[in-house]
Image (cartoon, rainbow, N blue to C red):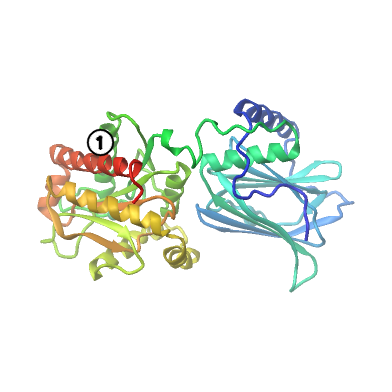
Protein backbone atom coordinates (compact mmCIF):
# COMPACT_ATOMS: atom_id res chain seq x y z
CA UNK A 1 0.00 0.00 0.00
CA UNK A 2 1.25 3.44 -0.74
CA UNK A 3 1.11 6.40 1.52
CA UNK A 4 2.16 9.97 1.37
CA UNK A 5 4.69 11.34 3.74
CA UNK A 6 8.38 11.14 4.19
CA UNK A 7 10.33 8.09 4.75
CA UNK A 8 13.27 8.35 7.02
CA UNK A 9 16.04 6.32 5.52
CA UNK A 10 19.76 6.29 6.04
CA UNK A 11 20.79 9.90 6.36
CA UNK A 12 21.60 11.27 2.94
CA UNK A 13 20.82 14.95 3.26
CA UNK A 14 23.55 16.91 4.88
CA UNK A 15 21.15 19.27 6.53
CA UNK A 16 19.62 22.73 6.44
CA UNK A 17 20.94 25.56 8.55
CA UNK A 18 19.84 25.20 12.13
CA UNK A 19 18.05 28.52 12.40
CA UNK A 20 15.85 27.68 9.43
CA UNK A 21 15.03 24.36 11.05
CA UNK A 22 14.25 25.96 14.33
CA UNK A 23 12.04 28.60 12.72
CA UNK A 24 10.03 26.02 10.85
CA UNK A 25 9.60 23.87 13.92
CA UNK A 26 8.47 26.90 15.91
CA UNK A 27 5.89 27.80 13.28
CA UNK A 28 4.55 24.27 13.17
CA UNK A 29 4.59 24.08 16.95
CA UNK A 30 2.59 27.32 17.13
CA UNK A 31 0.03 25.90 14.72
CA UNK A 32 -0.23 22.83 16.89
CA UNK A 33 -0.78 24.85 20.02
CA UNK A 34 -3.60 26.79 18.36
CA UNK A 35 -5.16 23.58 17.23
CA UNK A 36 -4.85 22.02 20.70
CA UNK A 37 -5.85 18.50 19.99
CA UNK A 38 -9.35 17.87 21.36
CA UNK A 39 -10.64 14.63 22.77
CA UNK A 40 -11.80 11.98 20.36
CA UNK A 41 -14.50 13.26 18.06
CA UNK A 42 -17.73 11.37 18.37
CA UNK A 43 -19.44 13.45 15.69
CA UNK A 44 -21.19 11.69 12.89
CA UNK A 45 -19.81 11.83 9.41
CA UNK A 46 -16.47 10.20 10.23
CA UNK A 47 -15.61 7.93 7.40
CA UNK A 48 -12.75 6.25 9.16
CA UNK A 49 -12.93 4.42 12.49
CA UNK A 50 -9.80 3.55 14.45
CA UNK A 51 -10.76 0.44 16.36
CA UNK A 52 -7.79 -0.78 18.32
CA UNK A 53 -4.36 0.45 19.33
CA UNK A 54 -1.41 -1.56 20.56
CA UNK A 55 1.88 -0.18 21.76
CA UNK A 56 4.75 -2.60 22.42
CA UNK A 57 8.45 -2.27 23.01
CA UNK A 58 10.97 -0.92 25.44
CA UNK A 59 13.05 2.23 25.81
CA UNK A 60 15.10 1.42 22.71
CA UNK A 61 12.32 0.57 20.26
CA UNK A 62 8.56 0.69 19.92
CA UNK A 63 5.91 -0.71 17.61
CA UNK A 64 2.49 0.90 17.30
CA UNK A 65 -0.30 -0.94 15.61
CA UNK A 66 -3.56 0.86 14.91
CA UNK A 67 -6.48 -0.98 13.32
CA UNK A 68 -8.97 0.82 11.06
CA UNK A 69 -12.29 -0.22 9.58
CA UNK A 70 -11.13 0.94 6.16
CA UNK A 71 -7.97 2.12 4.48
CA UNK A 72 -6.38 5.21 6.05
CA UNK A 73 -4.18 7.59 4.06
CA UNK A 74 -1.74 8.96 6.58
CA UNK A 75 0.82 11.74 6.22
CA UNK A 76 3.53 12.03 8.80
CA UNK A 77 6.26 14.35 9.94
CA UNK A 78 8.59 14.93 12.87
CA UNK A 79 8.70 17.68 15.49
CA UNK A 80 11.10 18.28 18.31
CA UNK A 81 10.95 19.76 21.82
CA UNK A 82 9.77 17.21 22.72
CA UNK A 83 10.60 14.65 20.04
CA UNK A 84 7.33 13.76 18.31
CA UNK A 85 5.97 11.87 15.35
CA UNK A 86 2.81 13.47 13.99
CA UNK A 87 0.46 11.46 11.79
CA UNK A 88 -2.41 13.21 10.00
CA UNK A 89 -5.40 11.20 8.85
CA UNK A 90 -8.72 11.93 7.21
CA UNK A 91 -11.33 12.63 9.88
CA UNK A 92 -11.28 9.62 12.16
CA UNK A 93 -13.40 8.38 14.99
CA UNK A 94 -11.11 6.98 17.65
CA UNK A 95 -12.95 4.07 19.15
CA UNK A 96 -10.04 2.96 21.33
CA UNK A 97 -9.87 2.25 25.05
CA UNK A 98 -8.00 4.64 27.30
CA UNK A 99 -5.79 1.83 28.63
CA UNK A 100 -4.56 1.22 25.08
CA UNK A 101 -3.03 4.70 24.90
CA UNK A 102 -0.92 4.20 28.02
CA UNK A 103 2.70 5.20 27.37
CA UNK A 104 5.21 2.42 27.07
CA UNK A 105 8.99 2.36 26.69
CA UNK A 106 10.14 4.75 24.00
CA UNK A 107 6.60 6.14 23.63
CA UNK A 108 6.00 8.61 26.46
CA UNK A 109 2.63 9.85 25.25
CA UNK A 110 0.00 9.01 22.65
CA UNK A 111 -2.53 11.72 21.77
CA UNK A 112 -5.24 11.67 19.17
CA UNK A 113 -8.18 13.75 18.09
CA UNK A 114 -9.86 15.93 15.48
CA UNK A 115 -7.66 18.71 14.14
CA UNK A 116 -10.19 20.52 11.96
CA UNK A 117 -12.83 19.77 9.34
CA UNK A 118 -11.88 16.57 7.59
CA UNK A 119 -8.64 15.99 9.45
CA UNK A 120 -7.62 14.06 12.52
CA UNK A 121 -4.21 13.88 14.08
CA UNK A 122 -2.13 11.45 16.10
CA UNK A 123 0.84 12.69 18.12
CA UNK A 124 3.34 10.16 19.40
CA UNK A 125 5.81 11.68 21.87
CA UNK A 126 9.07 10.13 22.91
CA UNK A 127 11.46 10.54 25.85
CA UNK A 128 14.30 11.16 23.45
CA UNK A 129 15.31 11.26 19.79
CA UNK A 130 14.18 8.43 17.55
CA UNK A 131 14.04 7.44 13.91
CA UNK A 132 11.01 6.13 12.05
CA UNK A 133 12.31 2.73 11.06
CA UNK A 134 9.18 1.64 9.25
CA UNK A 135 5.68 2.95 8.63
CA UNK A 136 3.14 1.12 6.55
CA UNK A 137 -0.56 0.60 5.94
CA UNK A 138 -1.51 -3.03 5.44
CA UNK A 139 -4.70 -4.86 4.70
CA UNK A 140 -5.81 -7.13 7.54
CA UNK A 141 -5.62 -10.80 6.71
CA UNK A 142 -7.68 -12.09 9.62
CA UNK A 143 -10.43 -9.47 9.61
CA UNK A 144 -11.88 -6.73 7.40
CA UNK A 145 -10.14 -3.38 7.39
CA UNK A 146 -6.57 -2.13 7.47
CA UNK A 147 -3.86 -1.52 10.00
CA UNK A 148 -1.19 1.14 10.36
CA UNK A 149 2.12 -0.17 11.64
CA UNK A 150 4.78 2.22 12.94
CA UNK A 151 8.22 1.11 14.14
CA UNK A 152 10.35 3.59 16.04
CA UNK A 153 13.97 3.15 17.07
CA UNK A 154 15.73 5.24 19.70
CA UNK A 155 18.45 7.25 17.99
CA UNK A 156 20.92 10.03 18.58
CA UNK A 157 20.06 13.73 18.45
CA UNK A 158 22.12 13.94 15.27
CA UNK A 159 20.04 11.27 13.52
CA UNK A 160 16.81 12.96 14.58
CA UNK A 161 18.08 16.32 13.29
CA UNK A 162 19.04 14.70 10.00
CA UNK A 163 15.56 13.25 9.58
CA UNK A 164 14.10 16.70 10.33
CA UNK A 165 16.42 18.27 7.77
CA UNK A 166 15.47 15.67 5.18
CA UNK A 167 11.81 16.34 5.86
CA UNK A 168 12.27 20.06 5.25
CA UNK A 169 14.21 19.38 2.08
CA UNK A 170 11.49 17.11 0.68
CA UNK A 171 8.57 19.36 1.62
CA UNK A 172 10.33 22.23 -0.14
CA UNK A 173 9.50 24.56 2.72
CA UNK A 174 12.98 25.92 2.49
CA UNK A 175 15.69 25.51 -0.08
CA UNK A 176 18.04 22.83 1.10
CA UNK A 177 21.58 24.01 1.47
CA UNK A 178 24.22 21.38 0.90
CA UNK A 179 26.41 22.04 3.88
CA UNK A 180 28.45 19.42 5.62
CA UNK A 181 30.00 21.53 8.35
CA UNK A 182 26.89 21.47 10.45
CA UNK A 183 27.26 21.77 14.20
CA UNK A 184 27.48 18.41 15.86
CA UNK A 185 29.11 16.89 12.81
CA UNK A 186 28.48 13.46 11.38
CA UNK A 187 30.27 10.15 11.17
CA UNK A 188 32.57 11.65 8.54
CA UNK A 189 33.97 14.47 10.63
CA UNK A 190 33.89 12.77 13.96
CA UNK A 191 37.49 13.75 14.60
CA UNK A 192 36.55 17.24 15.70
CA UNK A 193 34.15 15.89 18.26
CA UNK A 194 35.05 15.37 21.91
CA UNK A 195 35.33 11.81 23.17
CA UNK A 196 31.93 11.07 24.67
CA UNK A 197 31.68 8.93 27.80
CA UNK A 198 28.46 7.80 29.43
CA UNK A 199 28.87 6.67 33.04
CA UNK A 200 26.14 4.45 34.41
CA UNK A 201 25.89 4.18 38.19
CA UNK A 202 24.25 0.77 38.66
CA UNK A 203 20.85 0.37 40.32
CA UNK A 204 19.02 3.30 41.96
CA UNK A 205 15.67 4.25 43.43
CA UNK A 206 13.58 1.22 44.34
CA UNK A 207 16.40 -1.09 43.22
CA UNK A 208 19.13 -0.59 45.80
CA UNK A 209 21.33 -3.43 44.50
CA UNK A 210 23.54 -5.41 46.85
CA UNK A 211 23.94 -4.56 50.54
CA UNK A 212 27.06 -4.81 52.69
CA UNK A 213 27.26 -6.15 56.22
CA UNK A 214 27.57 -2.56 57.45
CA UNK A 215 24.43 -1.64 55.52
CA UNK A 216 26.22 -0.02 52.57
CA UNK A 217 23.88 0.11 49.59
CA UNK A 218 25.32 -0.66 46.16
CA UNK A 219 23.26 2.10 44.51
CA UNK A 220 24.91 4.75 46.73
CA UNK A 221 28.46 3.45 46.17
CA UNK A 222 28.00 3.34 42.38
CA UNK A 223 26.60 6.88 42.37
CA UNK A 224 29.40 8.27 44.55
CA UNK A 225 32.00 6.63 42.32
CA UNK A 226 30.40 7.91 39.10
CA UNK A 227 30.14 11.48 40.42
CA UNK A 228 33.78 11.42 41.53
CA UNK A 229 34.89 9.91 38.22
CA UNK A 230 32.98 12.58 36.32
CA UNK A 231 34.63 15.32 38.36
CA UNK A 232 38.05 13.84 37.58
CA UNK A 233 37.28 13.53 33.84
CA UNK A 234 36.07 17.12 33.72
CA UNK A 235 39.61 18.22 34.58
CA UNK A 236 40.77 16.85 31.23
CA UNK A 237 40.35 18.43 27.81
CA UNK A 238 38.51 16.76 24.98
CA UNK A 239 36.05 14.66 26.94
CA UNK A 240 32.31 15.06 27.23
CA UNK A 241 30.75 13.15 30.10
CA UNK A 242 27.14 12.17 30.68
CA UNK A 243 25.64 10.22 33.57
CA UNK A 244 22.62 7.97 33.15
CA UNK A 245 21.60 9.19 36.61
CA UNK A 246 23.12 11.75 38.96
CA UNK A 247 20.82 11.05 41.89
CA UNK A 248 18.99 8.21 43.60
CA UNK A 249 16.70 7.33 40.71
CA UNK A 250 15.43 4.08 39.22
CA UNK A 251 16.16 3.54 35.51
CA UNK A 252 15.34 0.46 33.46
CA UNK A 253 18.28 -1.28 31.84
CA UNK A 254 17.16 -0.39 28.34
CA UNK A 255 16.76 3.26 29.35
CA UNK A 256 20.45 3.23 30.30
CA UNK A 257 21.28 1.75 26.88
CA UNK A 258 19.09 4.35 25.20
CA UNK A 259 20.93 7.21 26.93
CA UNK A 260 24.29 5.84 25.75
CA UNK A 261 23.03 5.66 22.17
CA UNK A 262 21.34 9.08 22.35
CA UNK A 263 24.71 10.69 23.06
CA UNK A 264 26.50 8.50 20.50
CA UNK A 265 28.86 7.54 23.28
CA UNK A 266 32.36 6.42 22.42
CA UNK A 267 32.46 4.52 25.69
CA UNK A 268 29.87 3.32 28.20
CA UNK A 269 30.90 2.23 31.69
CA UNK A 270 28.33 0.66 33.98
CA UNK A 271 29.53 0.76 37.60
CA UNK A 272 28.63 -1.88 40.18
CA UNK A 273 29.64 -3.35 43.53
CA UNK A 274 27.65 -6.52 43.91
CA UNK A 275 27.67 -9.39 46.34
CA UNK A 276 29.13 -12.85 45.85
CA UNK A 277 27.79 -16.04 47.36
CA UNK A 278 31.12 -16.68 49.12
CA UNK A 279 32.04 -13.78 51.34
CA UNK A 280 35.75 -14.65 51.00
CA UNK A 281 35.78 -13.64 47.34
CA UNK A 282 36.92 -10.10 46.73
CA UNK A 283 38.46 -7.74 44.19
CA UNK A 284 37.38 -5.93 41.04
CA UNK A 285 36.09 -7.50 37.81
CA UNK A 286 35.62 -6.03 34.33
CA UNK A 287 32.84 -7.58 32.25
CA UNK A 288 32.10 -7.38 28.55
CA UNK A 289 29.01 -8.78 26.86
CA UNK A 290 28.88 -12.26 25.44
CA UNK A 291 26.19 -14.84 24.76
CA UNK A 292 28.64 -17.42 26.09
CA UNK A 293 29.58 -16.59 29.68
CA UNK A 294 33.20 -17.07 30.67
CA UNK A 295 32.20 -19.02 33.80
CA UNK A 296 29.21 -20.02 35.88
CA UNK A 297 29.63 -17.19 38.38
CA UNK A 298 29.64 -14.55 35.61
CA UNK A 299 26.49 -16.09 34.13
CA UNK A 300 24.81 -15.92 37.55
CA UNK A 301 25.93 -12.30 38.02
CA UNK A 302 24.44 -11.31 34.66
CA UNK A 303 21.16 -13.03 35.48
CA UNK A 304 21.03 -11.20 38.81
CA UNK A 305 21.82 -7.85 37.19
CA UNK A 306 19.25 -8.42 34.45
CA UNK A 307 16.60 -8.86 37.15
CA UNK A 308 16.84 -5.16 38.00
CA UNK A 309 13.75 -4.30 35.95
CA UNK A 310 11.76 -7.10 37.54
CA UNK A 311 12.76 -5.96 41.04
CA UNK A 312 11.12 -2.63 40.29
CA UNK A 313 8.00 -4.34 38.99
CA UNK A 314 8.71 -3.56 35.34
CA UNK A 315 7.33 -6.20 33.02
CA UNK A 316 10.21 -7.95 31.30
CA UNK A 317 8.52 -10.90 29.66
CA UNK A 318 8.49 -9.46 26.18
CA UNK A 319 12.08 -8.36 26.12
CA UNK A 320 13.39 -11.84 26.78
CA UNK A 321 13.68 -12.67 23.09
CA UNK A 322 15.18 -9.30 22.67
CA UNK A 323 18.21 -10.15 24.74
CA UNK A 324 18.97 -13.24 22.69
CA UNK A 325 18.28 -11.30 19.49
CA UNK A 326 20.62 -8.57 20.37
CA UNK A 327 23.33 -10.84 21.61
CA UNK A 328 23.27 -12.82 18.40
CA UNK A 329 22.44 -10.20 15.78
CA UNK A 330 23.14 -6.73 16.91
CA UNK A 331 26.38 -6.68 18.82
CA UNK A 332 28.60 -5.60 16.08
CA UNK A 333 31.96 -7.18 15.84
CA UNK A 334 33.71 -3.85 15.73
CA UNK A 335 31.97 -2.54 18.83
CA UNK A 336 32.81 -5.76 20.59
CA UNK A 337 36.45 -5.43 19.58
CA UNK A 338 36.58 -1.94 21.12
CA UNK A 339 34.81 -3.16 24.28
CA UNK A 340 37.36 -5.95 24.64
CA UNK A 341 40.24 -3.60 24.05
CA UNK A 342 39.03 -1.16 26.69
CA UNK A 343 38.36 -3.99 29.16
CA UNK A 344 41.94 -5.25 28.75
CA UNK A 345 43.36 -1.75 29.17
CA UNK A 346 41.19 -1.16 32.23
CA UNK A 347 42.22 -4.43 33.87
CA UNK A 348 45.87 -3.54 33.22
CA UNK A 349 45.59 -0.11 34.83
CA UNK A 350 43.42 -1.23 37.75
CA UNK A 351 45.86 -4.01 38.61
CA UNK A 352 48.48 -1.36 39.40
CA UNK A 353 46.23 0.27 42.02
CA UNK A 354 43.68 -2.13 43.47
CA UNK A 355 43.05 -5.82 44.06
CA UNK A 356 41.40 -7.79 41.29
CA UNK A 357 39.56 -11.09 41.29
CA UNK A 358 41.15 -14.12 39.54
CA UNK A 359 40.72 -13.83 35.76
CA UNK A 360 39.48 -10.25 36.12
CA UNK A 361 38.20 -9.86 32.54
CA UNK A 362 35.03 -11.93 32.31
CA UNK A 363 32.07 -12.22 29.94
CA UNK A 364 28.34 -12.69 30.30
CA UNK A 365 24.99 -11.59 28.83
CA UNK A 366 24.46 -8.27 30.59
CA UNK A 367 21.45 -6.43 29.14
CA UNK A 368 22.93 -3.06 30.05
CA UNK A 369 25.94 -3.70 27.77
CA UNK A 370 23.92 -4.44 24.66
CA UNK A 371 24.12 -1.14 22.72
CA UNK A 372 25.21 -2.37 19.29
CA UNK A 373 27.26 0.70 18.49
CA UNK A 374 28.70 1.76 21.86
CA UNK A 375 31.77 0.02 23.31
CA UNK A 376 30.55 -0.99 26.77
CA UNK A 377 31.99 -2.53 29.92
CA UNK A 378 30.60 -3.28 33.34
CA UNK A 379 33.02 -2.54 36.16
CA UNK A 380 32.48 -4.40 39.42
CA UNK A 381 34.55 -2.37 41.82
CA UNK A 382 34.49 -5.08 44.45
CA UNK A 383 32.02 -7.12 46.45
CA UNK A 384 29.90 -5.71 49.23
CA UNK A 385 29.59 -9.28 50.54
CA UNK A 386 33.27 -9.07 51.53
CA UNK A 387 33.97 -6.94 54.65
CA UNK A 388 37.35 -5.74 53.36
CA UNK A 389 35.91 -4.72 49.99
CA UNK A 390 33.01 -2.97 51.71
CA UNK A 391 35.47 -1.05 53.85
CA UNK A 392 37.41 0.08 50.78
CA UNK A 393 34.34 0.99 48.75
CA UNK A 394 33.30 3.33 51.55
CA UNK A 395 36.74 4.93 51.63
CA UNK A 396 37.04 8.05 49.42
CA UNK A 397 40.81 7.66 49.28
CA UNK A 398 40.55 4.11 47.95
CA UNK A 399 38.00 5.28 45.40
CA UNK A 400 40.36 8.07 44.31
CA UNK A 401 43.02 5.44 43.53
CA UNK A 402 40.58 3.37 41.50
CA UNK A 403 39.37 6.49 39.69
CA UNK A 404 42.93 7.34 38.80
CA UNK A 405 43.29 3.92 37.12
CA UNK A 406 40.02 4.28 35.22
CA UNK A 407 41.11 7.73 34.06
CA UNK A 408 44.44 6.41 32.78
CA UNK A 409 42.66 3.58 30.98
CA UNK A 410 40.20 6.00 29.34
CA UNK A 411 43.05 8.22 28.17
CA UNK A 412 44.92 5.28 26.65
CA UNK A 413 41.77 3.94 24.98
CA UNK A 414 40.61 7.26 23.53
CA UNK A 415 44.06 8.07 22.17
CA UNK A 416 44.41 4.61 20.65
CA UNK A 417 41.05 5.01 19.00
CA UNK A 418 41.82 8.36 17.46
CA UNK A 419 45.12 7.07 16.15
CA UNK A 420 44.96 3.71 14.46
CA UNK A 421 41.74 1.88 13.85
CA UNK A 422 43.19 -1.57 14.25
ZN1 LIG B 1 24.95 -4.37 40.58
The answer to which image quadrant residue 241 occupies is top left
Q: Is residue 83 left or right of residue 250?
A: right
Which residue appears at 17% of the width and 57% of the height? 385
Q: Quadrant of residue 77?
A: top right
Can residue 100 be seen here? The reply is: yes
Question: In the rendered view, does 48 fall on the left or right side of 19?
Answer: right
| Quarter of the image where one finds residue 66 | bottom right
Question: Ligand 1 is in which quadrant of the figure?
Answer: bottom left
Residue nearest the observer in this picture, 336 or 389: 336
Between residues 308 and 357, which one lies in front from this camera angle? 357
| Residue 242 location (% of width, % of height) | 38, 38
Q: Position of residue 412 (x, y in %)?
A: 25, 42
In the current view of this chain or complex, which residue is farthest to the right? 45
Q: State whether label 1 is within 8 Å of ligand 1.
A: no
Between 405 and 393, the one lying in front of the other is: 405
Q: Is residue 415 left or right of residue 128?
A: left
Is residue 348 placed above or below 51 in the rendered structure? above
In what element is the residue under mark 1? Answer: helix
Q: Is residue 246 above or below residue 336?
A: above
Residue 368 shows up from this direction: no
Q: What x and y, as percent, mark residue 97? A: 68, 57
- Please rate how many residues cluster around mark 1, counting C-alpha atoms within 10 Å: few if below 14, some from 14 to 19, many from 20: some
Nearer to me, 259 or 194: 194
Q: Which residue has dot 1 on it? A: 228
Residue 380, compared with residue 20, is above or below; it is below
Amino acid sequence: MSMTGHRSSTPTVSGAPRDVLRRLVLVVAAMLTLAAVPAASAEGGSQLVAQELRIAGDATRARLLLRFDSEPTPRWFLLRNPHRLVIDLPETEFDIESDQVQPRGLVSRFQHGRLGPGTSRIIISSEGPFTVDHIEVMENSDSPGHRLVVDLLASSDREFEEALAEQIATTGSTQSTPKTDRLGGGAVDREGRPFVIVLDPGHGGIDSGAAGTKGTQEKMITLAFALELRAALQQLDGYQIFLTRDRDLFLTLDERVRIARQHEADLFISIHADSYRQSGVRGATVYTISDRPSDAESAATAIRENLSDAIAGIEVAESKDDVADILVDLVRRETQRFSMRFARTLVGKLSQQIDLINNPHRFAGFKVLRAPDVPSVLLELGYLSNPQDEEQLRDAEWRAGAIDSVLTAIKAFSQGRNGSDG
